[in-house]
Amino acid sequence: MKIAIGSDHAGYLYKGRIIRFLSRAGHEVVDFGTDSEEMTDYPVFIRPVAEAVARGEFQRGVVLGGSGNGEAIVANRVPGIRCAVCWNVESARLSREHNDANMVSLGQRMMNLSTALQIVDIWLNTPFHGGRHAKRIAMIDPPG
């Protein structure tokens, strides 16, 4: 799977570990930045990830920050993006099964690294259930 990833300074440390985890699992990962823990503005790095996923250049996107909230808000402003803030494995599973989330937002300050990696793994490997959920997804971005 081709995955875009980006973070602000508050998600930078986990971003590197998640990139290694995804690469070892055989995924192609493209890092949209940031490149350090130096304070930065998260929209600069998150919007390009969301836009690339929305254009279909990547199947999924992972974004990180302190809580993950601001990153999800930015991503969800891009039409076609369904970015779920996930702080535990159950929220990650449901974001895929019920919401067909094509991006996940993680908060480095909200969880330990092991939990973050578990969330990413569950989120990537959980299929969308479709059915009654597909109707609801279609209502999010109605055509024309």
Image (cartoon, rainbow, N blue to C red):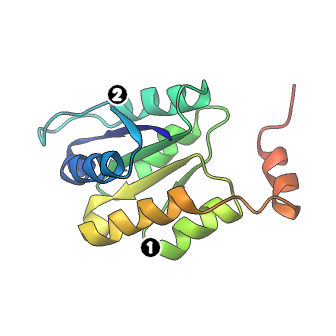
Query: Given the image, on which type of amino acid does mark 1 rest?
Result: Asn
Give the percent coordinates (x, y) of residue 95. Answer: 61, 62
Give the left or right position of residue 124, taking residue 95 as reference.
left
Image quarter of residue 125? bottom right
Q: Which residue is mark 2?
A: 44
Image quarter of residue 130? bottom right
Q: Quadrant of the C terminus?
A: top right
| Mark 2 vs 1, N-terminal side | 2
Q: Is residue 35 above or below residue 16?
A: above
Q: Which residue is mark 1?
A: 88
Q: Which residue is nearer to you in this view: 144 or 35?
A: 35
Give the percent coordinates (x, y) of residue 3. Answer: 45, 39
Q: Which mark is residue 99?
A: none
Q: Residue at x 34, y 28 (%)?
A: 44
Query: Given the image, on which type of amino acid does mark 2 rest?
Result: Val
Give the percent coordinates (x, y) of residue 60. Answer: 53, 42
Q: Residue at x 42, y 68 (%)?
A: 87
Q: Residue at x 29, y 55 (%)?
A: 66
Give the left or right position of residue 96, taking residue 41 as reference.
right
Give the percent coordinates (x, y) of residue 126. Answer: 60, 63
Mark 1 lies on a secondary structure that is loop
Q: Residue at x 53, y 66 (%)?
A: 92
Mark 2 lies on a secondary structure that is helix
